[in-house]
Amino acid sequence: MITLNFLGEGIFRSSIPVLAISLNSDPSAVGLSIAASKIPWLLLPIAAGLAIDHLSFKGIILSGSSIRLASFSLLAISMLLESLTFFEFMILSAIVTIGDISAELAIQTSIPKISPNHDPAKINSFLLGMQIASAQLVAPILTGVALISGPSTLISILIAIQIAIILIYHNPKINKFTSREPRKSHPQQILELLKDRTLFGTLLVASVMMASYGVWSSAFTLYVFDSASGLGLTTFGYGLMMSSIAFGSLAGTILSAKLVSKLPHFPLICASILAMTLLPLGGLIGGPSASASLTLFIYGFFLTIWNVISITYRQRFVPEGSLGRITGIYRSLTWGFMPLGAAVGSVICTQEGYRVTLALASALSILQLISLPLLRDIGKIHAKRLSPKKRTLQIAVGESDIE
C-alpha cells in the first residue's frame, strides 16, 4: 500500500521537468513547473498536521489519493483533447502535491502510533527504503520507459496506481491502524517544543538544504539535456542518472540502522551535511556523466542518514498528540523553501544561464554548515528516552517525558 503511494508520487515527480519542456520551451519552464508543484508545501502541511493529530490514518490516505486521482484524470482528459496548457499543467501539479502532502505526512507520523514498542530508527530506515526503492529507483526508470510511448501512457499508469491505493485502503483490516485516540495538546506546548535547540537546528539545515535543492533542480535538467556544454543525455538517460540518488539512498537505508545505533549521531550529521553540499558543486564543476552519477549517489546515501536521524529525533522528542502539527510546521517551513528556490533559479536560468544558477545553489548549500553547533546534542536525547514499553505506559496515563 505504502509502496504504491510512493511509486505514484515518484513517477509524477520524475516526469514534471520533461512534461514542462514539452509544453513550454522557455528555459524557465522547468524551474517554474517545479516551483508550482511545491507551492502547497508553504502552508498546507500545517493544516494537514492538525488533521493528522485528530483524524484517522486511513482517512487522510484516502483523501490524498482521491485528490491525486481527480488531478490525473483532468490531466488525461486535457491531453486527450490536446488542450493542455503550461499554466494548467502547473495548477494541476500543485493540486497533486496537496494529495502527496496529506499521504506522506500521515505515513510518517503514524509510526509511533502503529509501532510504539519498536525502535523508530529501524522502522524509519525500512520506510525510507520502501520510499527510495519505489519513488527514486523504480519510478524514474518507469517514467523514462512510459514517456517513450507518450505522456498519455504515463498519466494512465498514475491513474491506475491511485485507483489501486483507494481500493486497498477501503479494506476493513486497515482500521486496526486507526484505533488509537489522539492526544490533545495546547498551542503553548507546540511553541515550547519549537524552542528546542536541536529541533530548531534540524529545521534550519533542512530549510537551507531545500532552498539549495530548488535552485539546483531548476538548472540541473537543462545541464543534463544540453548537448553543447552539458551532458547531452536523452530522457531515458536522464531517468537512469536520477536513479543514482535512489541507489545511494538505498545503500544508506541498508546501513543507516546499524550506523545510527552504533555511532554517535553528531559526527554522522556532520558527515551528512558536508556530503550533501556536493550535489550542486558536481553540476557546477562539470565532468562526464559517470562523475555526475557518483555525486548523486553520494548525496542520496547521506541524505538517508540525515533523514533517519532527524526524523527519529522528532518522533522521540515530540509527544504523539503534537507530532502531526510539529511535522506539518517542520515540512511547511523546510519544503516551502523549495518552490522559492526553484522560482529564483528559473529567473536566473533565463537571464544568466544554468551555470550561474548552479553556482548560487552551491553557495546556499554551504550555508548548511552554520547550523552544526545547534545539532551537537542530537544523539543525547536518545540515551535519555525511556524504554518503548515504559513510554507507552506513560503516554497512556497522560504524562510526558519532554524536557
Image (cartoon, helix red, strand yellow):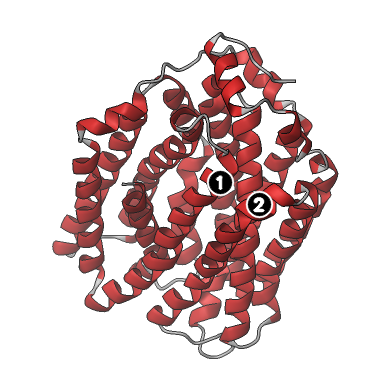
Kindly identify the residue that appears in the image at 52 percent across and 72 percent down. Answer: 244
Query: Could you tell which of marks 2 and 1 lies nearer the N-terminus?
Result: 1
Measure how far apart labels 2 and 1 are at the Cα level: 14 Å
Q: Quadrant of residue 168?
A: top left
Kindly identify which numbered label has been placed on residue 306: 2
Please determine whether, in this image, residue 44 is positioned above or below residue 145: above
Classed neighbour count for the residue bearing mark 1: other residues with Cα under 10 Å, few (<14), some (14–19), many (≥20): some
For the residue pair 263 and 83, the one nearer the viewer reads as 263
Q: Report the residue marked by disc 1.
A: 122
- Judge from the rendering whether residue 175 lies leftward or rightward of residue 54; answer left or right: left
Q: Amino acid at mark 2?
A: Trp
**Residue 225 in picture, x, y percent from top left:** 48, 81
Mark nearer the viewer, 2 or 1: 1
**Residue 306 in picture, x, y percent from top left:** 66, 51
**Residue 105 in picture, x, y percent from top left:** 46, 37
Q: Amino acid at mark 1?
A: Lys
Kindly identify the residue that appears in the image at 52 percent across and 63 percent down. Answer: 250
Q: Residue furthest left?
A: 81
- Judge from the rendering whether residue 289 lies leftward or rightward of residue 86; answer left or right: right
**Residue 153 in picture, x, y percent from top left:** 21, 68
Q: Is residue 325 visible?
A: yes
For the residue pair 278 and 109, the one nearer the viewer reads as 109
Please determine whether, in this image, residue 160 is positioned above or below residue 392: below
For the residue pair 233 and 387, the one nearer the viewer reads as 387
